[in-house]
Image: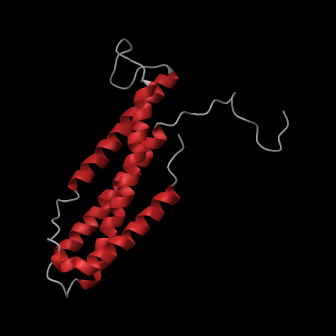
Amino acid sequence: MTPVRRRDLVFLGVAVAVAVWLVVRAAYGDLPPFRWWLPVPLGVLAVAEALGARTLRARLSAEREGRPAPGRSAAAARPVEPLLVARVAVLAQASAWVGAVLAGAWAGLLLHTAPALGRLAYARGDTVTGVIGVLVAVGLTVAALWLEHVCRVPADRDDEDPPRGARA
């Protein structure tokens, strides 16, 4: 499994922002007002993934060092299942993509509402929602990338190839 490239996430977010900006620009009057609580579930997911990354990092480092995980006795220490780590890595990658798409979508809304604060009746509330949405979606992306990083298997020093130009 290859890690998610940050460049791809940025490109996707910018493309979605432009597309959403065009749609919102054309249909803003027909859209319902965006409430401030709409991006809150993304924030809950971001916090859950960040806490999961912290916990998994502690468990994996404890397992690698041969000691019990924090808050556990030596008898209660169970190894982390490799399949669980693989599933969490897939969840992290999917969340990173979703976070990039939603950050672009909220940014597209902001591209239309922020310049029209004094001109449109619902622009102030929609701008607040857009700012919250962008912050939470970027937070989800960052938490997902951290979780993906935690799931990486460290390279063995014995298995590494020598650097190019180095002689064995």
Q: Is residue 55 above or below residue 71?
A: below
Residue 66 in percent (x, y) is at 49, 19
User: For this view, does 77 lie left or right of residue 127?
Assistant: right
Q: Is residue 6 above or below residue 2?
A: below
Residue 34 in percent (x, y) is at 17, 68
Q: Which of these two is toward me, 74 or 149? A: 149
Q: Which of these two is toward me, 102 or 151? A: 102
Q: Which residue is found at the position 14% from the left and 82% from the top?
A: 121
How many numbered callouts? 0
Q: Which residue is found at the position 41% from the left and 64% from the top?
A: 13
Q: Which residue is found at the position 39% from the left and 36% from the top?
A: 88
Residue 54 in sight in this render: yes
> In which quadrant of the rendered image does the C terminus lie?
top right
Which image quadrant is residue 112 in?
bottom left
Q: Residue furthest right?
A: 167
Q: Which residue is found at the position 27% from the left and 53% from the top?
A: 42
User: For this view, does 106 lie left or right of residue 77?
Assistant: left
Which image quadrant is residue 17 in?
bottom left
User: For this view, does 157 lie left or right of residue 84?
Assistant: right
Residue 106 in percent (x, y) is at 30, 66
Q: Residue furthest top?
A: 75
Q: Which of these two is toward me, 58 or 146? A: 146
Residue 117 in percent (x, y) is at 22, 83
